[in-house]
Image: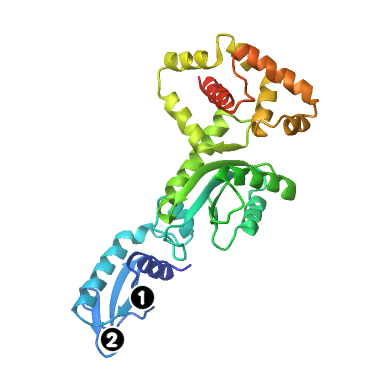
């Protein structure tokens, strides 16, 4: 996209006015604004990168001259920040630009994800683009991350952003044989919230990889709680973990076999059959390990509430 096209797109996005590129008039007032009643348009010029560019808007009255003057000032103020190589959607998600043209600005909900691959990022990005619907946005971001904003339709097959992330990870692993990590930002309530929720997804990705590198799907809501705990005094956090897991908690947290069993069990939504198959162990072996975790920590992670308490306490323990 040329600099002139980038300017017209930016003005249309900000003002909604139909602005066009045009030739620079032979005689231009010092003000940089010229109304031409013969053609019914008002021209304004901007200078940058050693050249003068001209643009025109419909109308040739006083209001159009005022509007053109304001546009001229606006373009001059942002000219140096207009990067022809920048993707408008990437700039928007990173908080450096306005909502791009073509993005529905009504009350539309989106699942927002940050997907990281340290191997063939191009292949991952291409695959994500192939599965994105016409109302979705897949954007190549910096640092090996692809952003996916998936429109949450009323007839969506997925109950949550987390469920879609799980299916997406499995499909990527199966289809292109790549491992990815996915940060789940949650549901953005309208396009204006997309940058906020992309920030959430990226934060979950970064914090999740730090605190729980063995996992590959990280929810911002979960790691927001971890962030709160990270700001508390260490003694307070230590007290919470002791209360949540009982006095012998270090025994189970230091046992790789027990922690592996807990991790797989939680990843498979507390389903013993699926978890045991995934681990290639008999279900009774898994049950024995879960019983042992309960004896040591006082938490039966086959129970949803205990499972959430155990996982939160474990992540906080790793943070200390």
Visible residue check, residue 206: yes
Visible residue check, residue 94: no
Figure colour scheme:
rainbow
Q: Is residue 97 above or below residue 264?
A: below
Query: x and y percent of residue 75 in the render?
Result: 31, 65
Residue tagged 2: 40
In the image, what residue occupies the spot 24% across and 68% down?
Answer: 70
- Can you name the residue that lies furthest to the bottom here? 38
Q: What separation in Å lies between label 1 and label 2 (alpha carbons)?
A: 13 Å
Residue tagged 1: 18
Identify the element where label 2 is drawn.
Answer: loop
Count of picture labels: 2
In the image, what residue occupies the spot 66% across and 54% down?
Answer: 127
Query: Which of the 4 image quarters holds residue 211?
Result: top right
Identify the element where label 1 is drawn.
Answer: loop
Query: x and y percent of residue 240 in the render?
Result: 47, 17
Mark 1 or mark 2, which has the lower sequence index?
A: 1
Q: Is residue 110 left or right of residue 35?
A: right
Q: Is residue 132 left or right of residue 89?
A: right
Would you call the spot at circle 2 few (<14 residues within 10 Å), some (14-19), or many (20 or more)?
Answer: few
Query: x and y percent of residue 264 in the render?
Result: 68, 29
- Can you name the residue that lies furthest to the top here? 247
In the foreground, 69 or 266: 266
In the foreground, 76 or 15: 15
In the image, what residue occupies the spot 69% across and 20% down?
Answer: 290
Q: Is residue 238 above or below residue 185?
A: above
In the foreground, 38 or 200: 200
Q: Is residue 9 left or right of residue 174?
A: left
């Amino acid at each position: 996209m040329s600099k002139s096209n980038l300017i017209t797109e930016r003005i249309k996005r900000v003002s909604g006015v139909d602005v066009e590129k045009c030739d620079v008039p032979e005689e231009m007032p010092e003000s940089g604004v010229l109304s031409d009643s013969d053609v019914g348009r008002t021209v304004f010029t901007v200078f940058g990168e050693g050249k003068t560019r001209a643009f025109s808007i419909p109308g040739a009255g006083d209001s159009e001259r005022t509007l053109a003057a304001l546009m001229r000032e606006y373009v001059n103020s942002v000219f140096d920040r207009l990067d022809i190589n920048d993707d408008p959607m990437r700039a928007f998600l990173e908080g450096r630009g306005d909502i791009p043209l073509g993005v529905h600005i009504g009350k539309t909900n989106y699942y927002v994800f940050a997907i990281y691959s340290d191997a063939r990022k191009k292949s991952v990005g291409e695959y994500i683009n192939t599965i994105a619907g016409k109302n979705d946005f897949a954007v190549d971001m910096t640092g090996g991350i692809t952003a996916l904003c998936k429109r949450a339709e009323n007839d969506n097959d997925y109950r949550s952003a987390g469920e879609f992330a799980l299916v997406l990870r499995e499909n990527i692993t199966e289809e292109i044989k790549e491992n990815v990590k996915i940060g789940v930002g949650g549901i953005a309530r309208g396009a204006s919230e997309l940058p906020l929720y992309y920030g959430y997804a990226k934060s979950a990705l970064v914090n999740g990889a730090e605190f729980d590198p063995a996992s590959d799907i990280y929810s911002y809501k979960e790691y927001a709680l971890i962030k709160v705990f990270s700001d508390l005094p260490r003694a307070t956090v230590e007290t919470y973990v002791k209360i949540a897991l009982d006095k012998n908690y270090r025994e189970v947290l230091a046992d790789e076999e027990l922690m592996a069993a807990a991790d797989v069990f939680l990843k498979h939504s507390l389903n013993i059959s699926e978890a045991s198959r995934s681990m290639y162990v008999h279900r009774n072996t898994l049950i024995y390990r879960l019983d042992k975790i309960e004896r040591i920590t006082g938490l039966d992670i086959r129970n949803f509430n205990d499972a959430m308490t155990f996982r939160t306490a474990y992540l906080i323990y790793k943070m200390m």
